[in-house]
Image (spheres, grey):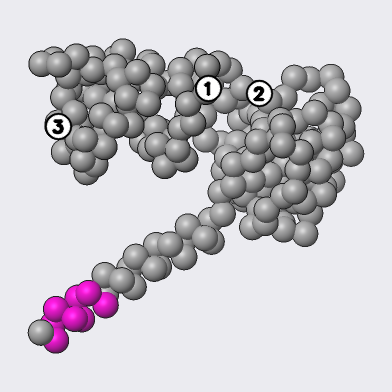
Amino acid sequence: MEKKVISKAVINRLPRYYRYLGDLLEKDVVRISSKELSERMKVTASQIRQDLNNFGGFGQQGYGYNVEYLHSEIGKILGLDKKYNVIIIGAGNLGQALANYADFERRGFFVKAIFDVNPRLVGMSIRGIEIRLMDELEEFLKTNEVDIAALTLPKTQAAQVASDLAKWGIKGIWNFAPTDFNLPKDVTVENVHLAESLMKLSYRLSVKEKEQQEKEQQ
């Protein structure tokens, strides 16, 4: 049987569904209709139903969605029923901020070590997570199970480090460097380009400003 291909747009919306359902759980909401969920999320009810139907639907006609069950099932789809060991490469401001973000652990992502080239940082720790020299990285990967490497490095260093990580068996890279990698197909990369995100925001602000100016001229 041919495996169903889920669009990237649907996958990109799943974490948002998960977050909103988590908020509803914290408020002790037991069930919700697609219409009510659409009003909260500013997504059409038909879009919600179409997205969830890619994975089986989960709703009951006349009842809606059981919030706890749907939250759990989306978590499984996202792989959040598993635990992931993470390392951070780059102990600058961004790397330290990631290490300090305790909420990752609630989602099943556990930072095990931080690596940097700066010898002055060696011996320091962030929330009990030791900062190590990059020279120790290969040996650490041989003796520890690591699922994901977060790269908070300058563009000039990131490509070589990513290549080394792939060679040493890392299958998941969370890339904050403003560059793309040419890696084997079995390595999954999630790019978080902060400057590009700001550019998208700038575009949207610019469009709204032009729309407002056109209204004023009418």
Question: Residue 54 at x, y = what percent?
Answer: 37, 26
Highlighted magenta segment, given as a residue range: 210-217
N-term-proximal mark, 1 vs 2: 1
For disc 2, the marked residue is: 85
**Residue at x 21%, y 22% (from the top left corner):** 27
Residue 144, compared with residue 118, is above or below; it is: above
**Residue at x 64%, y 40% (from the top left corner):** 189
Q: Out of 112 and 39, give the one closest to the viewer.
A: 39
Q: For this view, does 50 lie left or right of residue 8? A: left
Q: Out of 26 and 55, give the one closest to the viewer.
A: 55
Marks 3/1: CA–CA distance: 32 Å
Q: Which mark is residue 2?
A: 1
For disc 3, the marked residue is: 35
**Residue at x 68%, y 53% (from the top left corner):** 180
| Mark 2 surroundings: few (<14), some (14-19) or many (≥20) residues within 10 A | some
- Secondary structure at numbered mark 3: helix
- Does the image show residue 121? no
What is the tally of numbered marks visible in this picture? 3
Q: Which mark is residue 72?
A: none
Question: Residue 168 at x, y = what percent?
Answer: 84, 31
Q: Amino acid at mark 2?
A: Asn
Q: Out of 7 and 4, give the one closest to the viewer.
A: 4
